[in-house]
Amino acid sequence: MAFGDRVRTARQAAGLTQDQLAEQAGLDRVQISEIERGRRDARLSTLLRIESALGTQLIWA
């Protein structure tokens, strides 16, 4: 499973919209969308912020 797919699956399991995840992670919704679609490579710090907002591990899973 691609990383973007893991982000989308975890976000949906948490019951969050892209807007809500972006707000909780301190990011822009477009960033979340592009990461989920595999159109953007995110920096490690961005990925860690997404993990923190979701309360789950995505990178090392």
Image: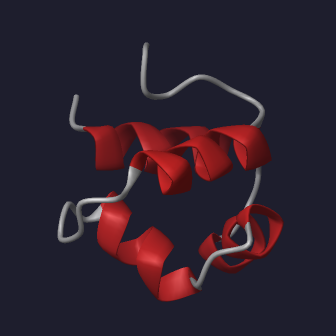
Left or right of 23, for residue 61: left
Let me know if residue 14 appears in the view.
no
The percent coordinates of residue 37 (x first, y second) are 25, 65
Q: Quadrant of the C terminus?
A: top left
Residue 26 coordinates in the image, percent (x, y): 74, 72
Q: Is residue 56 above or below residue 26?
A: above
Q: How many marks?
A: 0
- The percent position of residue 58, horizontal first and vertical second, equals 49, 28
Q: Quadrant of the N terminus?
A: top left
Residue at 76% in and 52% down: 15
Whether residue 28 is visible, yes or no, is: yes
Is 10 placed left or right of 23 in the picture? left
Rendered view: 23 above or below 36: below
Residue beneath the point at 21% across and 37% down: 2
The residue most toward the top is: 61
Along the line of sight, the residue nearer the viewer: 14 or 51: 51
Q: Quadrant of residue 16?
A: bottom right
Q: From the viewer's perspective, is 28 left or right of 53?
A: left
Residue at 53% in and 50% down:
45
